[in-house]
Image: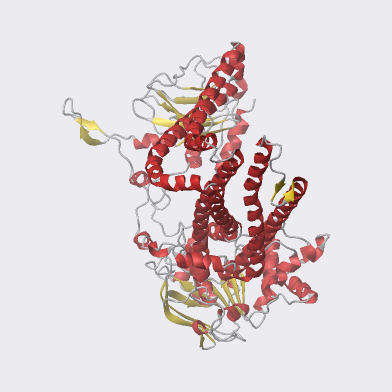
Amino acid sequence: MRNSKLLTTFSSRIPSYRIAPLGSPHFTSIPHGSQRPFTKTAVAICQNYHPRIQTLVSIQNLDLQRQFAFRTPPSTTTNAIELHASRYTGLNHTRLFSAARSLREQVPSAAAKDPTNGTEKSKPAIPPVQDELHKGFERSEKASQAAHINLSARLAKDGLAHGKQAGIGEIWRLIKIARPEAKILSVAFVLLLISSSVSMSIPFSIGKILDIATNTNPDGLKQLFGLSLPWFYAALAGVLTLGAAASYGRIIILRIVGERIVARLRSRLFRRTYIQDAEFFDANRVGDLISRLSSDTIIVGKSITQNLSDGLRAGVSGAAGFGMMAYVSLKLSGILALLLPPVAVAAFFYGRAIRNLSRKIQKNLGTLTKIAEERLGNVKTSQSFAGERLEVSRYNNQVRRIFELGKKESFISASFFSGVSGGMVQSGAISIGDLTSFLMYTAYAGSSMFGLSSFYSELMKGVGAASRLFELQDRHPTISPTIGTKVKSAQGPIQFKHVQFSYPTRPAVAIFKDLDFEIPQGAHVAIVGPSGGGKSTIASLLLRFYNPTKGNIYIDGCDIATVNAKSLRRRIGVVSQEPVLFSGTIAENISYGKPEATRAEIIAAARKANCQFISDFPEGLDTHVGARGAQLSGGQKQRIAIARALIKDPDILILDEATSALDAESETLVNSALAALFRGSNTTISIAHRLSTIKRSDTIIVLDSDGRVAEQGSYKELSSKPGGAFVKLMEWQMTGGESGMTPVAHYEGSASRGPPSEAEELQQMLQDGEDEEYDDGGEAGVDEQHQGKKLEPAKSDEEVGARAGAAVKH
């Protein structure tokens, strides 16, 4: 065993090594994940510590996760690290984080002077690759261009673009949403008047009944409103029943009308949303659109039905309340009118007093909640000290404080009317019944004012939600799917002539600068190029999801910018890398490409796509695929997507890396399904990376990173050019991106690869200690069966973990 070798072991009993306590200058604990204490497992390290170098060890157990930083002895060298796995107990997984890399980072270099003696002081030298890791990614020119974004298609969060405020026009437009329901809403308004009239008659009737009850004269009132008392009570019961029925009918009508308005709004908005162009969906989040379709429509529907009804009821009640106040007691009403100016002045002080009381009440309510939460959360502690009576008393005292504050608030609010009206009753100017009626009408009038205030706030909320809906409803897509010449056939040569294109949301990033190529009718063409080179963008342009910034795209000599996008898309079939299936049956997903397809056509398309697996399902074509096809495998979904494209009998078929994510068996089945397509008369465009797909193509179009065609020709022609773009691209893909790289030092690997991975470093450590036997250094309790064992180098993280796990088992 080498001198001063760092022995990293995980055990709870190693007497020859000192365990650095938490918080010591030699040991730093870095919390990560669970914060539970470290119990049985310990990190034993050498007693001599290096003042600078730190190595991280990540320990992951079933019930804890922590990271510890410990320091290595001064004489530790690059390959003086050994993983002692025989003492590795009680843990599931261990990673030695770049120990050798940490040592290399600390290579001394003459960089700084010691301020104490003026001598040169060594400074950690960071290798170039490691220095780049510390600095992170530098911003490229493309990233600088991408920073200039265009979100003109993004909807405003409040629905009011360019700071525009909601006005009378928006309110009137909101109300006009209910125009189709005007007749039934008028019935609801009549019922509202009936129920409100009945409600306003109750205080007057109660006042008269109280006058009869408090009248001491035996020859007093025998009739009310020309009716004997029994008939009056019967008539009052009938009126109350009528009011209840009217209120019930109003609620039912408004609920039905509200649901109908919401349904109509959602249907209209979903239709408007679905016809928007790709730029719109690039700039807006789906969650925001769903919010507009769901919650905003509910707010609008409620605002123009229930809220409008509440506002009308508040207005009617307020007007009737003030009128009846004047009818019951013109004197009290006059006093109120005369006192309005001084009351307005006194309202300031009244409001301040009420506000201060309200703050105190809220503060004490918070204290009450805190007491309840704290005491109930620690009830066992309180019970262990027999403190139940103390805690109950503390809680009751706080409740009493809140009650006293509430009582004071009520006293301030009622003092004025109590004083004025009480004096009038004593003088005989007003009876007790009339006073009761007056106070009840006052309450009605006051509540109606609050109702109108609530109506206004809810109306403004509805206007805000409606503005968001109107913004979406009024937006016209840049590419309308229904405008232009209808396409009856998309057969013919496809030409891209000097096409320039940038995505609307990133106008400064040019995807194509001068794209120019032609695809003959019925040809099978493969488009290859580097990642991000615009291969899939070609498919988007053909489908008219976007229009070129400059240049033209022709199909059979017709510029597709002038044709009906919807009819064009009907003649193009698309199979994407990750096919999306909709919730429903297999038959419904296949017929999505042709809704009017017969059962026989669906079966024929499924057979062409090699969907024989359907016969293994009990329900066959009627099997539900689940959300996004979750019940099917990747290969099965891909073949259903091919059948969906085939059933359209498209003139142009676009395969966007249709087999890149499949396993070998699924790829074979999908390729056999695609082979039938290649023999057809339709034009097939394959966006591919796999060599097998590229070889089957008649023509290969190679794109470069600048958005131009680098090469075009057959596979035989392009592969015979040693220095051609296609050959370089294939070499790059076959070697995993390492071809053509200049080799550098053994540690650095290559300029593109960067520093070695954790698995490579651990493998190197095991190789360094492969020829040495483990020396326990006099440690007690080491099993002899583990002495002298060697660990062979592994080739991956998984193999390293497997071998380390095998070595630690006793």
Q: Depth check: give the residue in front, 219 or 678.
A: 219
In the image, 486 versus 170, the foreground residue is 170
Q: Residue furthest top?
A: 385
Residue 416 visible, this orientation: yes
Q: Residue at x 47, y 17 (%)?
A: 17
Describe residue 610's horizontal placement relative to residue 183 as left or right: right
Which residue is more in the foreground, 531 or 44? 531
Image x and y of residue 77, in percent: 39, 30
Residue, far bottom: 557
Position of 288 relative to 718 (above/below): above
Residue at the limit of the structure toward the right, as seen here: 618
Snapshot quadrant of residue 636? bottom right
Q: Residue at x 35, y 47 (%)?
A: 132
Quick check: 750 left or right of 778?
left
Percent coordinates x, y for residue 691 in the rendering = 57, 67
Total numbered circles:
0
Closest to the observer: 160 or 335?
Answer: 335
Quadrant location, the C terminus: top right
Q: How is the image coloured?
A: secondary structure
Residue 773 visible here = no
